[in-house]
Each structure stands twice: as C-alpha cells, then as structure tokens.
Image: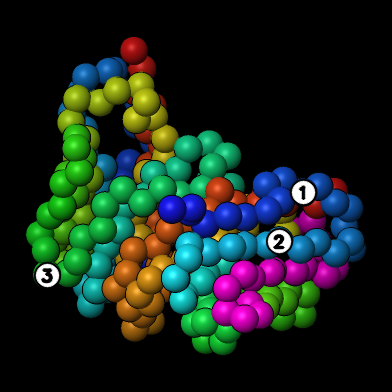
Amino acid sequence: EAGVVQSPRYKIIEKKQPVAFWCNPISGHNTLYWYLQNLGQGPELLIRYENEEAVDDSQLPKDRFSAERLKGVDSTLKIQPAELGDSAVYLCASSGDSLTGELFFGEGSRLTVL
Amino acid sequence: KQEVTQIPAALSVPEGENLVLNCSFTDSAIYNLQWFRQDPGKGLTSLLLIQSSQREQTSGRLNASLDKSSGRSTLYIAASQPGDSATYLCAVPSGGYNKLIFGAGTRLAVHP
C-alpha cells in the first residue's frame, strides 16, 4: 500500500514568487492535514480537511496561503506571494480516523525562499 | 493550551546502550499519544500509538509508556544501534480531535 505522496520534494524560489505543493493521501483516508515544520522544531498544523471540507484552517495565514482538496482526495497548498520567512518543510499527513487515528506523514516538501 | 516538552533535546550514546526519551504534556485530557521518528531531510515515521486506555505499547526494541495523570510518556529503546540515530518526536492531540501538538524532539546519535 502506498504511503502519503508529496511533490515536489524540494523547491527554491525568489521572494514574491508563487509556489504550490501537492499531496496524495493514503487511499481511504478521509482526513488530510498540512503541517509546517521549521528547522529544529516540531510540526505545526496549518489546515485540516475532512473529505473536501476544510474544518480547521485557523492557523493558515490566509493573506498569502490557500489550500484546496477537490473531490476529497488530493490536496494542493499554495503560497502567493512567498516571503523569506516561508522557508520551511511543508508536511502532508492523513488519517483514517480524525478522532483517535494514527497519523501517517509524507516525506515533505522543503521550500527555500531567496 | 496544550504544550509538549521533550527532554533531553539531544543525546549521544555508544552502541548497545539502553536509553529513555522523555515527553511531558500540560493537558492530560488526551485520546492518545504518538511517537514519531524523523531522519534528516525526511518526513515523520510513526513508531507507536498509545491510546488513553493503555499504559504502554511495544514494537520490537521500542517500548512507550503513558501516564496521563502525571502528563508524561517515555520511549525506551533497548540495545541501541547506529541505525537508531534520528530525531524522535512525541505528539498529543488537542482541540477535541486528532490535531497533533508536537514537542521539539530529541535528537539521538548512536555511535559505534
């Protein structure tokens, strides 16, 4: 069974440019999460989806970040325009049970903004 | 507000040692606690999930315990190997569902 798949693994852009990250969760997992991980820290939640609905986006900086999960499967996280402080690893995770289920993470997308 | 602390921040041990990683959390009203491993430049790999009704979980050389009342969990690694070198993170849910709050991790180095 395939795990959580993310792309691209690495992205280098100049500030003010847009960038998008893609995530394909484990088959059958209705809950999808995007986390942000800064160097030397634990991940922090950006947004959680139940199927196609964003049920918790309270920590997503909505002025420049957006996300979508059309059809309740794949998801895309976009930043426009990117700032220097956005340099981090963006992790996608999925779970079969949003209440008590185990989370499974992808390899992450490492963003460097110059 | 749930806060998670991991001690020590870094640990270097010779191969073969048994070791304990500590995790503490401020809000004991949790459904479960999860331990992850993260290799450099990689994502998180789930190691153990302990439900709130359980006291411990074991997987191979790993044993995780949970004491909700004191807000603590420990990850015990037996007979450490160089391949165990990684960062170990614990996480607990917050906000009434599985929104994980992570500690900053313990960076483990096992040298031959």
Q: Is mark 1 on a helix, strand or loop?
A: strand
Q: What residue type is labelled 1?
A: Lys
- Check the image and report above or below for B28 versus B86: below
Q: What element carries label 3?
A: loop
Which residue is found at the position 80% from the left and 52% from the top?
A: A113
Which residue is found at the position 57% from the left and 67% from the top?
A: A34
Please indicate, yes or no, whether residue A28 appears anywhere in the rendered image. yes
Residues flagged by tags 2 and 1 on a common chain: yes
Q: Which of A56 and B101 is in front in this view?
A: A56
Q: Which of B41 and B102 is in front in this view?
A: B41
- The part of the image, by quadrant, that contains residue B10 is top left
Does the segment drawn in magenta span residue A78? yes
Q: Which chain carries label 2?
A: A
Q: Which amino acid does label 2 sit on?
A: Phe
The C terminus of chain B: image quadrant: top left
Q: Give the range drawn in magenta.
A: A69-85
| Few, some or many residues within 10 Å of mark 3 (<14, 14–19, 20+) | few
| Residues under numbered marks 2 and 1 in contact, where contact means CB atoms less than 8 Å apart | yes
- Check the image and report above or below for B74 versus B15: below
The residue carrying mark 3 is B53
The x, y position of residue A67, in whole percent, is: 68, 76
The N terminus of chain B: image quadrant: bottom left
Please indicate, yes or no, whether residue B4 appears anywhere in the rendered image. no
Which residue is found at the position 17% from the left and 69% from the top?
A: B52
